[in-house]
């Protein structure tokens, strides 16, 4: 595919240069019309190219949606994600409709009303009615979108915390993530970077009893169908916690705690076996195998086959290794989660170990 | 016409003194106070900066398409320090995206676009001898020049240029411990930007005063060409918002060098807790975007003005809905100052604010839509002259619509959550403000080249330039929407650490190939531009048969613009193809345009302008 594209593009480039040299020769000969102002012939040629261009543009847009449409993320793995995707679908459908109509009119008019010497243009300066119509239509459509969007927004951002909510702190630093679970008491202990010392890498206040049962992990495990409230804290610079599969994102700001809440609905296992993901991973592994062959030929190590995992990534420029600041996310059944979390040591235990 | 000259000659005496000056090479070409020369200086400096900015984008596009592969291109342009063994380093990548953004937004699309055309067109189109203050105008250019030199010199400092992104969010931009570019490179960046803001204010105040005070007799505000309206309002936005960036920059300088804590708090870096306490990076984001968002309108409004003018002249029709166009410029300008928060939906600010900013942001779509529809209607039943300027104007409307529409997605706080800071954003703003504004710039250069240099640019090379550019730029930015929707973050040096992105590699190669072609075809423009300055066909006084006043000045530039009296104005600038009352012929028989300095004719219906 890539090779084919490159060949096509190089061929086009070749045609361009060939045409250009021709044009240069023509322009040098200095015959008939050298005024450099478009004449009827130019108007006609350019108008035809305009028409050709709009067709090509339509084909390219169509091709893009067919070829790359499935690059869109899989079905949202969070409760609000379904609403998000619906709103996204409506918006894309709407803007593509407007796009198709306006681009057609623009280039079609450019084609149809091409200049001809002696033709009279229509002196048409104003039409209040028309202008009213195309002010009011966007007003109505946008009002609908705004209202729909704002309802969804307040649903997502208004967090009702109850006993069932799992509170997790996401801790960001150059260049990695940690997760802190609130432990038995479901209350996160106080923390500040000023407490960072030795094994106390996220700066928990050692005098705060709530912190002792907190569990700090390097993987994020979430029980399915249970609301999670994330509290974000950064140690150094701005980061952004981006959970693409859950349609969630929040900046992580040093000096303050930000938050976001969502309910994961699809376990890692279920996502892996979904039709979309099976196909996607097959395709990715095909690509990886191909690349491995090239790498091995060069004497490099081959790539591992890929298995789908959810991930959290940094989406705010944060330094040299910004591009590799990620954390694995595992969404699992409640009992799997419970057994995993019980294996994790508490902060209190880590402290004790250090003292010994 | 002699009647007009007689009518205006009386009040004109005192303006004539300029002609007797002896001009040396230095006063004419270097420290010139003539607005036409200053406009050219802005244009050429802007184009040079543009070439550098585009070259940078090609370098990081090559890295993105073929990650971590060695290339002679890197060896040539980056050297061993930034491209060890020919492989681009991550810090070089971040520096390139940062400086590319800074140069293109400020140095090319702000100074190069509005600096060039405000200087060239404001006095010429309103009928003034020069700017209100020629000296301040000259100062404005030279401070801009100094600022450009400092910005470029930052590329050569030991610790590297600023590399915290063009938005320079602290703490990353405040702490050299966080990224090497935040050392000397960032200091130079801040100095260059402070100077840039100073020159921008000098220029803007000058433009505003000139438009308000120096309009010729009869040139009421509702007779101004839309170019002037756009440039005038742009200058006002600049005066309102640029000082806020200066304050943000000053506070950042203080945080960096004098131990204050405006933006810094609770930071542990390189094994040490910093003393800073109580500041907030979110404050910086507010201040930055209070300029940053109006800035995109500072970039796009002049382009809109130029396109409106070029389109009307080449359609041989009045611009449709002149008053609605002015109203939408004013509406956009007003709204532009109250939407900055849409860059910050997920910054941690109160979600309620997010709702307010969604509301104001989507409102901007309304005047923008009105403008787009009015341009399309301007083409309707026209007699379109496909000059290169016209092609770029049509291209402008096309990319403005394509890029603008995705703004409806990004401006919606909900939808922004998952596409924020992904390639979807890159696609959106490059189409709607980068590419569109560049098309506006090109439309302006092709259209007013005869006025600037007294010669014509080659039209066939112009056609080649336009078509390859429009195909290439759609090829670069349309596919980017899709990789953005796949969740690919911007500013990643390579995507290979996420196997999930492996199938985006092909798209990235395609984008880069298109980018290289588009960049190469700009050489055709550069060739055409330079060649035409010296060897282009000599221009006639009014090559496009346009109505505006600049085409009543002689081809050879004179100090003071008009050798005789300043013309008076009797009509708006869009009387193209106006018929006489009997509808038998044009108002001036056989001529489909009526320049602004022609009085109302017998047998002509008077309009509201």
Image (tube, grey):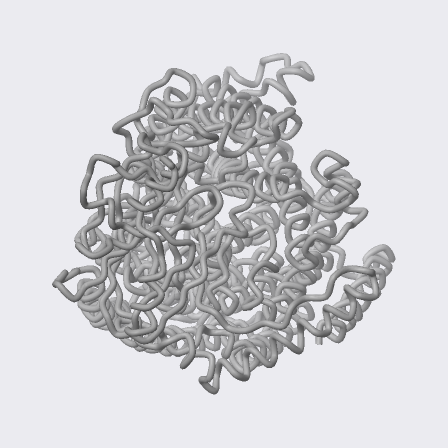
Residue A213 location (% of width, % of height): 25, 50
Left or right of A2? Residue A89 is: left
Does residue B382 show up?
yes
Residue A277 location (% of width, % of height): 49, 80
The part of the image, by quadrant, that contains residue B411 is: bottom left
* Labels in figure, total: 0
The part of the image, by quadrant, that contains residue A48 is: bottom right
Vertical side of B553 occupied by A312: above or below: below
Left or right of B332? Residue B383 is: right
Q: Nearest the camera: A131 or B469?
A: B469
View extreme (front): residue: A356
Left or right of A251? Residue A315 is: right
Q: Nearest the camera: B403 or B505?
A: B505
Residue B150 location (% of width, % of height): 58, 24
Left or right of B414? Residue B122 is: right
Q: Nearest the camera: A219 or B221?
A: A219
View extreme (bottom): residue: A275
Which residue is at a point 38% across and 74% down the rendered structure image? A92
């Amino acid at each position: 595919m890539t090779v084919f594209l490159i060949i096509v593009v190089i061929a086009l480039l070749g045609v361009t240069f060939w045409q250009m040299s021709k044009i240069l020769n023509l322009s040098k000969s200095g015959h008939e019309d050298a005024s450099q102002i478009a004449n009827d012939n130019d108007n006609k040629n350019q108008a035809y190219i305009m028409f050709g261009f709009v067709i090509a543009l339509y084909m390219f847009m169509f091709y893009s949606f067919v070829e790359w449409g499935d690059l869109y993320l899989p079905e949202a793995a969070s409760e609000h994600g379904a609403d998000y995707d619906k709103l996204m679908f409506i918006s894309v459908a709407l803007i593509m409709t407007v796009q198709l109509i306006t681009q057609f009119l623009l280039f079609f008019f450019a084609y149809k009303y091409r200049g001809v010497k002696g033709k009279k243009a229509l002196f048409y300066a104003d039409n209040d009615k028309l202008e009213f119509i195309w002010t009011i239509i966007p007003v109505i459509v946008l009002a609908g979108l705004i209202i729909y969007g704002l309802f969804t927004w307040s649903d997502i951002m208004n967090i009702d915390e109850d006993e069932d909510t799992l509170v997790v702190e996401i801790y960001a630093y150059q260049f990695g993530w940690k997760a802190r679970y609130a432990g038995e008491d479901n209350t996160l202990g106080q923390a500040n970077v000023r407490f960072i010392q030795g094994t106390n890498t996220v700066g928990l206040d050692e005098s705060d009893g709530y912190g002792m049962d907190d569990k700090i992990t390097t993987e994020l495990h979430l029980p399915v169908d249970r609301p999670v409230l994330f509290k974000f804290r950064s140690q150094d610079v701005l980061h952004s916690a981006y959970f693409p599969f859950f349609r969630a994102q929040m900046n992580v700001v040093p000096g303050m705690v930000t938050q976001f809440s969502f309910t994961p609905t699809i376990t890692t296992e279920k996502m892996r076996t979904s039709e979309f993901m099976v196909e996607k991973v097959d395709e990715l592994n095909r690509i990886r195998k191909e690349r491995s062959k090239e790498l091995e030929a060069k004497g490099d190590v081959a790539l591992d086959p890929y298995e789908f995992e959810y991930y959290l990534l940094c989406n705010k420029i944060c330094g040299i290794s910004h591009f590799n600041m990620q954390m694995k996310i595992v969404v699992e059944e409640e009992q799997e989660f419970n057994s995993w979390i019980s294996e994790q040591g508490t902060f209190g235990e880590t402290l004790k170990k250090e003292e010994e | 016409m002699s009647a007009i000259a007689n009518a205006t000659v009386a009040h004109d005496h005192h303006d004539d003194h300029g002609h007797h000056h002896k001009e040396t090479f230095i006063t004419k070409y270097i420290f010139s106070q003539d607005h036409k020369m200053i406009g050219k200086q802005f244009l050429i400096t802007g184009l040079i900066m543009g070439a550098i900015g585009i070259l940078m984008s090609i370098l990081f596009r090559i890295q993105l398409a073929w990650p971590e592969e060695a290339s002679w291109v890197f060896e040539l342009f980056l050297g061993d320090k930034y491209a060890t063994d020919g492989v681009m380093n991550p810090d070089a990548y971040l520096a390139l995206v940062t400086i590319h953004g800074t140069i293109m937004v400020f140095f090319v699309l702000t100074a190069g676009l509005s600096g060039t055309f405000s200087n060239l067109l404001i006095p010429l189109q309103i009928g003034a001898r020069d700017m209100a203050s020629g000296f301040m105008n000259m100062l404005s250019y030279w401070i801009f020049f100094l600022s450009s030199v400092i910005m470029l010199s930052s590329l050569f400092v030991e610790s590297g240029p600023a590399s915290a992104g063009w938005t320079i969010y602290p703490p990353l931009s405040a702490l050299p411990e966080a990224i090497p570019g935040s050392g000397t490179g960032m200091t130079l960046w801040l100095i260059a930007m402070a100077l840039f803001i100073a020159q921008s204010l000098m220029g803007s105040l000058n433009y505003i005063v000139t438009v308000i005070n120096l309009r010729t007799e009869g040139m009421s505000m509702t007779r101004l060409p839309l170019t002037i309206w756009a440039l005038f309002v742009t200058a006002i936005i600049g005066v309102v918002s640029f000082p806020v960036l200066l304050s943000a920059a000053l506070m950042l300088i203080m945080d960096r060098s004098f131990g204050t804590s405006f933006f810094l708090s609770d930071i542990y870096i390189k094994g040490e807790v910093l003393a800073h306490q109580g500041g907030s990076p979110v404050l910086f984001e507010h201040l930055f975007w209070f300029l940053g968002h109006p800035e995109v309108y500072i970039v796009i409004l002049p382009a809109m003005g130029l396109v409106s003018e070029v389109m009307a002249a080449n359609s041989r029709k009045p611009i449709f809905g002149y008053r609605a166009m002015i109203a939408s410029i004013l509406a956009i300008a007003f709204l532009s100052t109250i939407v900055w928060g849409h860059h910050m939906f997920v910054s941690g600010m109160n979600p309620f604010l997010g709702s307010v900013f969604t509301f104001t942001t989507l409102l901007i779509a309304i005047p923008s839509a009105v403008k787009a529809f009015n341009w399309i209607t301007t083409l309707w039943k026209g007699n379109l002259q496909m000059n290169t300027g016209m092609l770029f104007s049509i291209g402008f409307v096309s990319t403005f619509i394509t890029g603008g529409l995705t703004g409806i997605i990004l401006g919606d706080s909900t939808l922004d959550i998952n596409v924020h800071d992904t390639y979807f954003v890159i696609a959106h703003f490059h189409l709607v403000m980068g590419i569109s504004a560049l098309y506006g710039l090109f439309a302006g250069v092709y259209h007013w080249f005869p006025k600037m240099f007294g010669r014509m640019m080659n039209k066939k090379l112009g056609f080649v330039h336009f078509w390859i550019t429009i195909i290439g730029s759609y090829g670069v930015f349309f596919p980017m929407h899709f990789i953005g929707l796949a969740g690919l973050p911007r500013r990643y040096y390579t995507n290979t650490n996420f196997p999930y992105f492996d199938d985006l590699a092909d798209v990235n190669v395609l984008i880069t190939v298109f980018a290289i072609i588009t960049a190469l075809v700009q050489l055709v423009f550069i060739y055409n531009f330079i060649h035409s300055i010296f060897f282009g066909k000599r221009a006639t006084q009014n090559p496009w048969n346009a109505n505006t006043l600049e085409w009543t000045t002689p081809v050879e530039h004179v100090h003071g613009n008009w050798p005789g009296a300043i013309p008076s104005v009797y009509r708006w600038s869009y009387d193209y193809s106006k018929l006489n009352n009997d509808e038998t012929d044009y108002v001036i028989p056989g001529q489909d345009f009526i320049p602004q300095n022609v009085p109302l004719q017998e047998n002509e219906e008077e309009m509201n302008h």
